[in-house]
Amino acid sequence: MVLSGGTGVIGRAALPALLAAGHEVVVLSRSLPNHEFARSHGAEAVEGDLLDPDSLKRAYAGADAVVNLASQIPIGYTAVLPGAWRRSDELRTTGVAHVVAAAAEAGVRRVVQESVSYVYADAGDSWIDEDDPLEITAATEPVAVAESRVQEYSDSVRTGVVLRFGSTVGADPQTAFMLRGARNGRPVGFGRPEGWAHIIHTDDLGAAVVAALHAPSGVYNVGAEPVRRADLAEGFASSVGVDRPQFLGPILRRVAGGRIEPLTRSLRVCSERFTANTGWAPSRPHFDASWLAAAAELQSSP
């Protein structure tokens, strides 16, 4: 199988999990350090880029599955800078179009595509499953485009699987940024305190990707039990000794722009369909402050 995005947050969890499950993995990479990371884990590395369709055609020759976890999500305040999301949007639109075209030409039977659950419309306290409506804005349209490409790929002999992950918490740069923000009195809460957040610990990402290799075609939510946004913010604050977490106010939300809005939605997302079809279940099903310990080594990063 061929893995793209193998050195990102999800990819770094997925690569060792895939190898441990006995899969032969070829990692698509654009740089020598990423080549070395893949080889250090026992995977093969090949040069390629989702925006270079010829490189994908070469990489996919003879592959039985393609797992695309490639994304480039801006961290922290860089998310509001002009052009910060350009690469991410290109990967989800043009990049995924290249992935499915090259996979079809190479005769690949299965494509697994990373996605995000904040594409759903705000549902308040109501539970959300895969049949509930999406809210498409300029921020979420690239996500929807990527999903539709993979769904169109599916037919009687080809399988397309979309994984709508919750927001990652754990050993990742965004968690470290949020902890530093909480310590310095910056807002770490988004949306309404009584709203719901759909999250997943980084420890559970790899097993979910492995499970997706056995899932029927479809879209699946992947995450832990939803948590009240007030409790999530409190967890960040208490982990750094702060009494009261701050929430992003209306003025800051306007300044941040439309890219922040999906992160403020109340998303009480259910992942039971993925569990029913694959047997996957999160090893960390309920959020608590221990989720944040894995980011300790990253907190000092600039």
Image: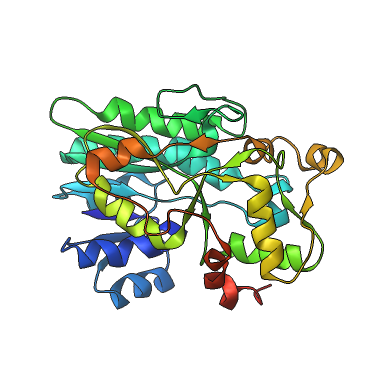
Residue drawn where x is 71% and y is 71% of the image: 240
Q: Is residue 8 visible?
A: no
Q: Quadrant of the C terminus?
A: bottom right
Measured from the top left, where is residue 115 in percent x and y? 44, 41
Q: Is residue 24 visible?
A: yes
Name the foreground residue: 119 vs 104: 119
Measured from the top left, where is residue 287 in percent x and y? 53, 56
Measured from the top left, where is residue 267 in percent x and y? 56, 36
Q: Does 249 appear above or below 44?
A: above
Which residue is the extreme one toward the right? 251
Query: Does residue 209 appear to the left or right of 213 in the view shown?
Result: right
Query: Does residue 122 appear to the left or right of 71 in the view shown?
Result: right
Residue drawn where x is 17% and y is 50% of the image: 63
Measured from the top left, where is residue 153 in percent x and y? 27, 29
Residue drawn where x is 42% and y is 57% of the image: 10
Way the structure is coloured: rainbow
Name the foreground residue: 193 vs 120: 193
Residue drawn where x is 42% and y is 29% of the image: 129
**Quadrant of the image occupied by residue 236:** bottom right
**Quadrant of the image occupied by residue 206:** bottom left
Q: Quadrant of the N terminus?
A: bottom left
Query: Does residue 228 appear to the left or right of 151 in the view shown?
Result: right
